[in-house]
Image (cartoon, rainbow, N blue to C red):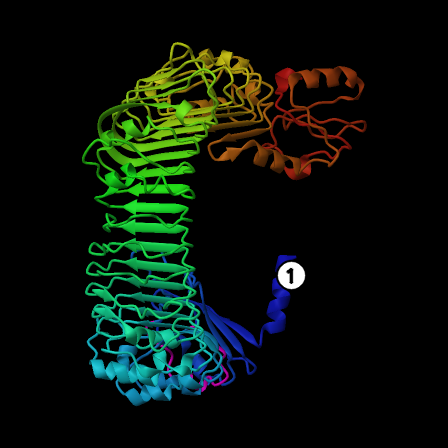
Amino acid sequence: MHDLISDLARFVSGKVCVHLKDDKINEIPEKLRHSSYFRGEYDSFERFDTLSEVHCLRTFLPLDLRTRPRFDKVSKSRNPVNRRRSRVKEMPSQMGQLKILQKLSNYRVGKQSGTRVGELRELSHIGGSLVIQELQNVVDAKDASEANLVGKQHLDELELEWNRDSDVEQNGAYIVLNNLQPHSNLKRLTIYGYGGSKFPDWLGGPSILNMVSLRLWNCKNVSTFPPLGQLLSLKHLYILGLGEIERVGAEFYGTEPSFVSLKALSFQDMPVWKEWLCLGGQGGEFPCLKELYIKNCPKLTGDLPNHLPLLTKLEIEECEQLVAPLPRVPAIRVLTTRSCDISQWKELPPLLRSLSITNSDSAESLLEEGMLQSNACLEDLRIIKCSFSRPLCRICLPIELKSLHIVECKKLEFLLPEFFKCHHPSLAHLFIIRSTCNSLSFNIPLGKFPRLAIIQIGRLEGLESLSISISGGDLTTFDLLNIGRCPNLVSIELPALNISRYSIFYCENLKWLLHNAACFQSLTLQDCPELIFPIQGLPSDLTSLSIENCDKLTSQVEWGLQGLPSLTSLTISGLPNLMSLDGMGLQLLTSLRKLQICDGPKLQSLTEERLPSSLSFLTIRDCPLLKDRCKFWTGEDWHLIAHIPHIVIDDQSQDSLSRSSRDFLHPNYRKLDSVGEWDTWRREKANHIQCHSTAEYGFVPPKFRWWHFESLEQFLEGALPKPPYAIYGPLGPSEI
């Protein structure tokens, strides 16, 4: 059906729409209106020569574009410049002849006649989004004026780009940009790599009053702003890489009121910016601002805007000299700081819900003083890249705190012992990641964390032992323990409690996993070569067990699996020396539904008995000897696993083999999987049976009703009988 619709679409649109493939279009349809092409790695204008004869083309669309970021969102990367790039090295000559063209995503300015920016003059119908690149190639400012951007009323989004490495005379760049004034209908504008010392007057004037979003990026010579505050519709303003701006003052706002619609404001990578002056007028400079980002402005000092009544998100990063107290922001919900002096903070915004502190020298005082504790709404706290220099006397965290992240911090032996002594009634998630401590052993008393559900500890160097304790009568919601890549960890001890999921991975020195009648439903052990099973064995309620690359574990034959009546999933991987799994008692796991055996170069057999009938899925990978014994239909151990509905052995699956076999059979076939079923059926239907399992059968008896075969590989499609019923199964000639 899809092919029919595709063919119909090509038939109907064949003379109106043409896709340019690897070769040129040899014949141009007279009614061609829309054309597209897939971008190549090295496209040249010769590829598009034939389009010069097209005079009614409305759409010229390059495909396989990179995903573009939302224009109205701030990127989280340090350099959010992620613009759409065209791989076309040169534009086709005489693009200006495509006077009815409606879509043009990129235009790359050349220096030769026919590829200059003036070619856009007659393209008055183009709309949507347009990127004009390589504007440093404009040698005559009049050519920029001839592009007539001010007359392109259908454009919604425009990007003007200069090559950052070009040496364009500042005054010349200014005249070019001044002549590229867009139509007043434009909603979004980006200016990138502009080399002039100031912006033209139209950028802050009434001619672009409908502008919703503005990005000024890497305009390295600009030293002053136009009155952007007068753009009444502007909602998003992103400023990055303006290397000569030292002061943001009255010229930025214009007359009052200013920035009446602005919701998001970002300053980033402004190395000489020192002062931010505010007008202090009634209602403030930013009455609607909700998000404020200030990043990598190392010389910025003084005060931030003081009156931001609607601000909900504030991020200040890499502003080492900005020691001003927090502005009055009663509505703020998210506050992020990085490499900033927070010592002057006296109180946090009352409705703050998420706080992130990165690379701060004042982390100890922040945790010891009552400023955090007095905040009744704070739920998420992140302490990142902080080094603790002394033991903490106390830790005062908010009573409603639900999530604590400690990431890339040093000397946690000064923090964690005191932290685990305190009562945290609401804490549900604890994450300690990529941090260091000095020979630390700690106990987590769940009685002080009644709502703690998840503990994740990863890459904590210096942690030697971990224990979790619980007192009689304590209620707990503890559900998941995840420990990984702790190179010094030797032992883990768990109390008698129910845990849904428990995983340990890449702890190369872990030797002891102790549990006092603990019950966990899922256990994953990966790359712990020194770990052995505890004397008390595994919890009887275990439902899922995965063991990968644990050398001492996999060398143990007696795992006590027979004591796991509820086990439904078992994965064993990394068996370098094990030759058989027979001693593990796989056949006794009566609830087992999924079994995976991987990476056993010497493994020859699973079990001497038939695997449990409860099994639905069996996977065998990278076990060459076992693969031969379990070969579909003919393997020596095939009869021990043939009853399992879904079997995968390396890149082959029983399902695919079965489907290919069934295609030859009458639709009313009956499948009998087990030997018991076959025997019962044979006794009941003996008077109707004639069975053959080899290709020696030469004709079909008149009363033939049932067919049994071992494999279809020997049969040609035409040689197979078509009875009303057919049966296939794993039985060989000796079973018949």
Front position in the image: 236 or 423: 423
The answer to whether 302 appears left or right of 290 in the picture is left
Quadrant location of residue 487? top left
Q: Say which quarter of the image contains residue 393.
A: top left
Which residue shows up at 44% across the image and 34% down it?
426
Q: Which residue is mark 1?
A: 4
Q: Is residue 551 above or below residue 200?
A: above
* Tally of marks: 1
In the image shown, does 565 or 729 lie closer to the viewer?
Answer: 565
Q: Residue 239's image quarter?
A: bottom left
Please identify the dominant SS of the magenta region.
Answer: loop
Q: Is residue 25 visible?
A: no
Task: Please indicate, yes or no, whether residue 614 appears anywhere in the rendered image.
Answer: yes
Q: In which quadrant of the rendered image does the C terminus lie?
A: top right
Nearest the eye: 223 or 158: 223
Residue range highlighted in magenta = 89-105
Question: Is residue 425 shown above or below 604?
Answer: below
Q: In the image, 69: left or right of 163?
A: right
Inspect the image, locate mark 1, and give the three-letter code of the amino acid beneath it. Answer: Leu
